[in-house]
Amino acid sequence: MAAPVYDVDFYSDDVIRNPWPHYTAMRALGPLVWLPAHGNYALTRYTEVAECLRDPETFCSGRGVAADNTACETMRGNSIASDGERHNAIRAAMATPLLPGALNEIRALLDALSQDLIDTLLQRGHFDAMKDLASHLPLTVVRDLVGLPDFGKGNMLRWAAAAFDLLGIQNPRGKRALEIFLEQREFVNKHATREALKEGSWTSRIHELVDEGGLAAELAPYCIRDYINPSLDTTISATGQLIWQLAMHVDQWQLLRSRPELVTNAVNEAVRLASPIRSFSRHATRDVRFGEWMIEKDARVMVLYASANRDERVFTDPDRFDITRNSRKHLGFGSGIHMCVGMHLAQMEMVALLNAMLPRVERIQCAEPQVALNNTIYSFASLPARLFPATVRADTRRNAEVKDQRATVVSRLVRANVVERREIAQKTICLTLEPSEGELFTDWQAGAHIDVHIRPGLVRQYSLTGPYESRRYRIAIQEEPESRGGSAAVHRKYQVGSEILLGGPRNHFRLNEEADHTVLLSGGIGMTPILAMAWRLYELKRSFEWHVSVRTLSRLPFAEEPELSPFTDRIRLHVDDAVDTPALDVGELMRSAPSGTHFYVCGPRAYMDYIQAAARDHGVESDRFHLEHFGSEISADGEPFSVIAELSGRVIQVGSDETILAALRREGIHVETACQNGVCGTCLTEVTEGRPDHRDMVLTDAEKASNQRIAVCCSRSKTKVLKLRI
């Protein structure tokens, strides 16, 4: 059966100026309509839009997200118009400075600029809220953070507006936009060089990632363009809507002044009503049924965010501005893997403006806005406004109390120096570290690891290795061929005399020093924590044996070093390409081990899976079998584990192919969530015990290293038990 037809030009001036009656009419026809003017399907209702956004396997972005072929082909390959590994690489490269923890560095600046701005506007009287207020922080702060040279900085708004026009159709606006977009592309390719970009800026960091091997060089221009296009217009649009709605709804402004803890709700409610992105498209990878109607494979589907955000089936009185609504349910930032990468910055800017206004502004007055004519962005071109000063300032102490309570990294960082650097195997180095003057190292035990803060936004964990020394740490780093920047940066950056910033140590791989017998098993670079254990057992004169597996002898760390000499008689070497070393027979090892033996395993995932399967087959109790995972190698699934809901004491089992969120929901425990793909931060939950296996793209590396919070929608556990404050 054919989908209902709605015969209107979605990109006409009249529809752009007043789209709301059209959305209502389309939703009334059904969740899916056919737009003959554009030859596209359109999803109109909240549930179906959300399902589409969270199902990239069925509704792909890699064939373009515009409403016609020209723009889809022209703009393919950037973060919003890509899928799979390419999308993941671009998003991972861009996301780091935009994560909530990283943005804390500019919070004070945003607050100060907002306060100065509101004081200025109060004195001025009449002003244009779009030009003088909504644009101020994006143009003052964000444009500088992007870091383009002057010509690029001066054209960011023009380029971004053109990109969003182009993402519609090739009407006169789209055709003009194509020329401007090509101008931007030429500028980025020719002039956004590392020498021209501001040092320390977001775009300069992209070149650093390329140097470190964390990003393919051909993806760098896409990342730079993606910093330019969405960083201004969407925030300006939502801010303008926020001011307009608060002016039109005096009761909501007064409620907000009396309950400043609702500032984030107010921001999200403005984003819901504004829905700055009217629509992006997807392409169906298979036939998809929506009720009575079918979307054919390869069909283009317009995803109407703005319609979904006013769906009366989900939002009571959906056209009303209500700051007490559930602030996390809207789709104004999208959902799924393509959720807006800059959403946290946009929210922070708008919250800063509101926090500056609350004690200073009694009333907001706005005249009728003029709608900007853009194919994709819904925004005001102008919004005449006036702020009336408060005679008595509102009490903002409550607001200070309810500001973001999320945990930050509180572990003290220690400055250290590299006092020795040795190559201990092919592409593997060992760094010996001592505390800088005035610093002290924390004691550590075998199995511990430290955090190496390579640069802002790049933190990696490395096991402490070798014998214990009170004023020395040793770590070994193997340069990975698929390095995301960490190991390559360590190899390149740290020489004798280099200063290095450390966090920790922490230990989730503790050695039972009382075991009658211990079997140590390591694969490749996984021998680093095992070496510390061997030294400790040797010093305690405990019974142990160590089975060292490696593909080739040239990749065996410490093979020619004295670290292994005191207990070489305890080591059994298994080299894949050597005929004179025996293969590792794990089954026989398990069978012949004395009763009560403890097993410690560290190495590549396949190696550990093999040994763990043998342990299960031979009945080795879980409390005698210990694993240390390499975080970068953990796949989307994993071993089962238990979650303890601390507030209720309930224990929930999480299956091998199940997320924590799914397991909690199965047991009737509710956790607020939005994207369900680890990019929005809605489901971040406090961890009180255990070691998370972080797979999200919302926590910074430093926050992940602290293990204080976990995104339960996508992350798992590296320990058998994870206790959460729920």
Image (cartoon, grey):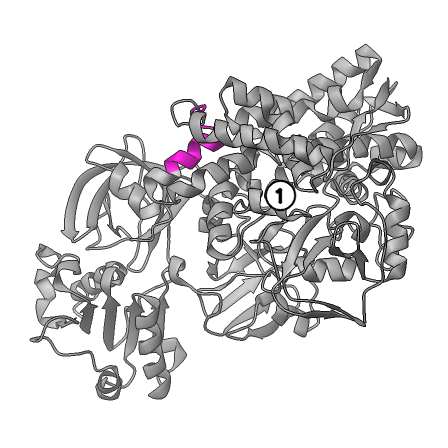
**428 vs 503, nearest the viewer:** 428
Q: Can the viewer see residue 457 in this picture?
A: no
Residue 234 falls in image quadrant = top right
- The residue that label 1 is drawn on is 71
The correct choice, above or below, for 443 with respect to 599 in the image is above
Asked whether residue 118 is drawn in magenta, I would say: no
Residue 323 falls in image quadrant = top right
Quarter of the image for the N terminus: give it. bottom right
Left or right: 303, with 448 as reference point: right
- Residue placed at 66% from the left, 57% from the top? 53
**542 vs 142, nearest the viewer:** 142
Single out the residue that lies furthest toward the top: 124
The amino acid beneath tag 1 is Ala
- Residue placed at 35% from the left, 87% from the top? 617
* Range of magenta residues: 197-208
Residues packed near mark 1 inside 10 Å, few (<14), some (14 to 19) or many (20 plus): many
Q: Where is residue 233 in the image (x, y as percent from the top left)?
A: 68, 32
Q: Where is residue 329 in the image (x, y as percent from the top left)?
A: 75, 53
Q: Can the viewer see residue 1 in this picture?
A: yes
